[in-house]
């Protein structure tokens, strides 16, 4: 009887060891399976297929496939194929869309601190806009997106905005009065131009060509990329180099989708994104001069008579929005240092 009890104990201990080993093997298999997981991401943006934003998406898709040994693929939906930006954000929140490049002006309607990027005449040039991404306030702005089930992973720009007008050029403050001008949105930029006597209208990129063609608007705030990709030079008369606003986007992820990925796959994605952003920014800087040279052969390109008078008026907007939002105040101060 005693021997039988000892035998039963030994069998029980052996079973525990065997079951434990099986469990460990399952864990290893599960980990191995996660690391070998395949992805078919969806990425959306509002621009045409030839625009730098869409080309950035193509570069990101290339980097992902290479760095993941083919496990990560990304389908790109340009020209707002999945709906306007409000729809894109909703899709990111529910996980039906993985990534999108959302314009800063739209994001500033959901996160007011991002309106700091829309401040008129804050940046001297494109390089100054790019440098501002690295400031502490700019990084804090990205963190705000988590409040709404989103991840602000990085910024990506599309050059600084100038004014395309159908009629006579706008070269001084007096010539702004009465003009119906389209902007991408953002409370501060609309306030600024309204204060100068214009009738600013917030309008999405896909609507601009027809609105300018039919006279709904007299002019549009736009950078050199869509001037070429959307062929706005066909309907505008003068392109005024105001350099009045940094126009950028937030590379935004579905928080639930991104955080469901294993850490190693998140790392692969992060490195691919950083490489695509670096490539894209180099393309932006090099392409800006090239784009301007092309436009000079297609449309009348003119300068402001006195940029300083526009900057002096902009200070009123800086003061107003700084008093309402501490992060905007910190951002403006960081840029002006």
Image (cartoon, rainbow, N blue to C red):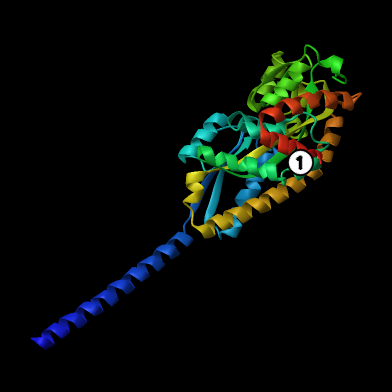
Instruction: Residue 219: tell me if it is visible.
Output: no
Give 106 or 206, whichever is nearer the viewer: 106
**Is residue 83 shown above or below 193?**
below
Q: Quadrant of residue 132?
A: top right
Which quadrant of the figure contains the N terminus? bottom left
Instruction: Residue 313: tell me if it is visible.
Output: yes
- Residue at the spot x=55%, y=57% of the render? 70
Outermost residue, right direction?
305
- Residue at the spot x=29%, y=77% of the render? 17
Q: Secondary structure at mark 1?
A: helix
Which quadrant of the figure contains the C terminus? top right
Give 8 or 285, whichever is nearer the viewer: 8
Q: Position of residue 99 (x, y in %)?
A: 56, 43
Outermost residue, top direction?
178
Label 1 sits on residue: 334
Left or right of 156 in this view: 95: left
- Residue at the spot x=64%, y=25% of the render? 204
């Amino acid at each position: 009887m005693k021997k039988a009890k000892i035998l039963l104990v030994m069998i029980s201990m052996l079973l525990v060891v065997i079951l434990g080993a099986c469990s460990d093997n399952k864990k290893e298999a599960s980990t191995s399976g996660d690391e070998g997981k395949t992805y078919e991401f969806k990425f959306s943006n509002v621009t045409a297929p030839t625009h730098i934003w869409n080309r950035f998406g193509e570069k990101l898709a290339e980097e992902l496939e290479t760095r993941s040994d083919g496990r990560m693929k990304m389908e790109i939906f340009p020209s707002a194929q999945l709906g306007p930006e409000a729809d894109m954000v909703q899709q990111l929140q529910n996980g039906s869309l993985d990534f999108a490049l959302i314009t800063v002006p739209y994001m500033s309607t959901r996160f007011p601190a991002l309106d700091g990027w829309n401040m008129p005449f804050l940046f001297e040039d494109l390089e100054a806009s790019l440098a501002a991404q690295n400031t502490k306030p700019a990084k804090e702005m990205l963190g705000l997106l988590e409040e709404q089930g989103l991840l602000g992973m990085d910024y990506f720009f599309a050059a600084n905005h100038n004014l395309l007008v159908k009629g006579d050029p706008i070269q001084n403050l007096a010539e702004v009065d009465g003009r119906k001008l389209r902007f991408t949105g953002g409370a501060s930029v609309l306030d600024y131009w309204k204060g100068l006597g214009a009738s600013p209208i917030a309008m999405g990129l896909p609507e601009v060509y027809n609105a300018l063609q039919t006279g709904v608007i007299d002019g549009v705030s736009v950078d050199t990329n869509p001037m070429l990709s959307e062929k706005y030079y066909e309907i505008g008369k003068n392109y005024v180099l105001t350099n009045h606003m940094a126009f950028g986007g937030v590379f935004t992820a579905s928080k639930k989708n991104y955080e469901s990925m294993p850490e190693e796959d998140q790392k692969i994605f992060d490195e691919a994104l950083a490489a695509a952003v670096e490539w894209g920014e180099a393309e932006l800087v090099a392409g800006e001069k090239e784009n301007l040279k092309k436009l000079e052969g297609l449309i009348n390109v003119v300068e402001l008579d006195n940029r300083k008078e526009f900057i002096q008026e902009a200070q009123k907007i800086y003061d107003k929005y700084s008093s309402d939002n501490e992060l905007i105040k910190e951002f403006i101060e960081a840029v002006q240092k």
